[in-house]
Image (cartoon, grey):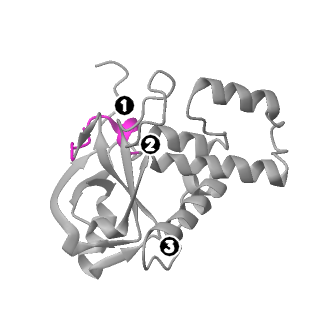
């Protein structure tokens, strides 16, 4: 799997040997409920997970496991600013320490949406549970049902999703607790280029 990070973080990893992601960036702060939910899932599903630390990497891209993220696609695979030095790390983290989830389904978690298996179930949900007003949210019981549906983000290898409704398994992310230098297999440094509007 691959992780793209600032070169400063790669140098710190080399110096320290291992790192926890204790700092909270703006993306996480703006999606606090979703990130806390993922941490809870890691506690449930990864033996020995013990901290709030969570690292993100790419496990599968365009349906190909182990495909390298294209470093030219800045806004797709990473968010560095033009001219910054960044690094693409190829990682070999033990599978027992990794929680895989579908990236497209993760958007339902980020947006606090109910995750249905098919269009019929989605329509039934919408009829029974009108979308709450911005800033208000669902009541406690309804929110619990929404969050229960999110566990389907881990079911991307099953046939339960209607592919005509939500194609799943094309892009898969990997979450893990500890970033270790010994798990780095290859390293590619690069300088962020301007965003390309057209290929």
| Span colored in magenta | 66-78
Residue picked out by circle 1: 195
Establish if 167 lies above or below 21: above
Label 3: which secondary element: loop
- Cα separation, mark 1 vs mark 2, equals 22 Å
Residue picked out by circle 2: 103
Label whose residue precedes the other's in the sequence (1 or 2): 2
Q: In which quarter of the image is the N terminus?
A: bottom left
Left or right: residue 198 versus residue 24 is left
The location of residue 87, given as percent across then percent down, is 25, 55
Query: Main structural element of the magenta stretch: helix, strand or loop?
Result: loop
- Cα separation, mark 2 vs mark 3, equals 23 Å
Front residue of 190/150: it is: 150
- Cα separation, mark 3 vs mark 1, equals 29 Å
Residue 12, by quadrant, is: bottom left
The location of residue 187, given as percent across then percent down, is 17, 58
Q: In which quarter of the image is the C terminus?
A: top left
């Amino acid at each position: 799997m691959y992780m793209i990070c600032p070169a400063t973080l790669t140098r710190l990893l080399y110096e320290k040997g291992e790192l926890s992601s204790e700092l909270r960036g703006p993306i996480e702060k703006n999606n606090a409920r979703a990130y806390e939910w993922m941490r809870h899932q890691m506690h449930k599903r990864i033996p020995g997970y013990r901290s709030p630390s969570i690292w993100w990497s790419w496990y599968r891209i365009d349906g190909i496991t182990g495909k390298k993220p294209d470093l030219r696609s800045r806004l797709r695979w990473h968010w560095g600013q033009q001219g910054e030095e960044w690094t693409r790390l190829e990682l070999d983290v033990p599978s027992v320490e990794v929680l895989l989830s579908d990236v497209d389904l993760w958007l339902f978690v980020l947006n606090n949406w109910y995750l249905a298996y098919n269009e019929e179930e989605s329509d039934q949900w919408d009829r029974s549970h009108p979308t709450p007003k911005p800033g208000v949210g669902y009541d406690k019981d309804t929110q619990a049902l929404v969050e229960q549906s999110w566990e389907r983000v881990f079911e991307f290898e099953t046939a339960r999703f209607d592919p005509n409704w939500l194609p799943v398994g094309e892009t898969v992310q990997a979450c893990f607790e500890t970033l270790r230098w010994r798990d780095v297999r290859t390293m590619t440094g690069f300088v962020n280029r301007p965003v390309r509007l057209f290929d």
